[in-house]
Amino acid sequence: MFRGLRSILIIFFIVIGSIFLWEKGKSLNPFSQQEIRTTHNMVLKEMSALGKIELANFTFRDVVEQELKFNYLPNPKAILIVQGNAIGCIDLTKVKAEDVATKDDTLIVHLPDPELCHYSIDHKNSRIYDTQYAFMNEQTLLNEAYSRAQDKIKESALEMGILEQTKKNADLVLKPILEKISGKKVVLQYQLRATLDKPK
């Protein structure tokens, strides 16, 4: 009888010890779940997918008078009515993970500077109004006129505040998109100065 009781006690302690070691072992198991951490990069991925988002489009119409001067021949002249446009955009592919921060229910996004990403002549809606003494120099005359007109489009767009308008339009267009994606209130912030891309 004593042996039987001892056997029962031994089995009891073995079971209790096994349970204790099992529970203790789970806490030491490197593969056991200790804590749940969730990181969302949805906003950043969506922004990268958008790429360069065009936010401001300025259209210009200009009357260009171009003249080539010669010493002994009449000066070739041309008058062109030129139409063109300039586009302000923000390159969202430049946004990095550290540029996106969350504070309570607000998402703070540090955007890259707005860019004058495109400016060009709309040749389809431009026309030659008049030429004089052009003859063999007509193509040179017109090419120079269009080149000067394109430079003027860039200059005028910057003077008329296309980069600032791009920022304002980002609040109207981009901000609601990010708020819908993130489900949070969005605050857009920028760097101190704007940059320009080469014309395309």
Image (spheres, helix red, strand yellow):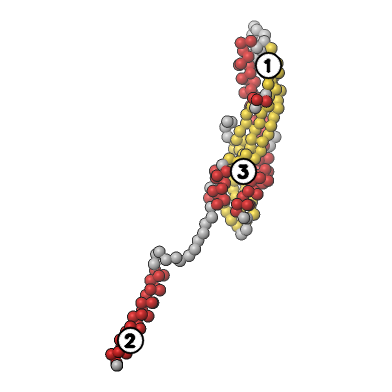
The residue sitting at 69% across, 29% down in the picture is 60
Quadrant of the snapshot with the N terminus: bottom left
In percent of width and height, residue 48 lies at: 55, 45
Q: Nearer the viewer, residue 190 or 192?
A: 190
Residue linked to disc 2: 8
The residue sitting at 60% across, 53% down in the picture is 182
Q: CA distance from mark 3 to mark 1?
A: 42 Å
Q: Secondary structure at mark 2?
A: helix
Check whether the beta carbons of the residues at disc 3 and disc 1 lie within 8 A of each other: no
Which image quarter: residue 4?
bottom left
Check whether the beta carbons of the residues at disc 2 and disc 3 lie within 8 A of each other: no
Q: Residues within 10 Å of mark 1 (few under 14, many from 20)?
A: many
The residue sitting at 55% across, 44% down in the picture is 49
Residue 188 visible here: no
Q: CA distance from mark 2 to mark 3?
A: 80 Å
Give the amino acid at mark 1. Answer: Ala
Task: From this view, report whether residue 50 is shown above or below residue 138.
Answer: below
Q: CA distance from mark 2 to mark 1?
A: 114 Å
Question: Disc number at residue 192?
Answer: 3
Which image quarter: residue 84?
top right
Compared across the picture, whether 20 is left or right of 122 comes to left
Question: Disc number at residue 78?
Answer: 1
Give the amino acid at mark 3. Answer: Leu
Total of numbered circles in the picture? Answer: 3
Q: Nearer the viewer, mark 3 or mark 1?
A: 1
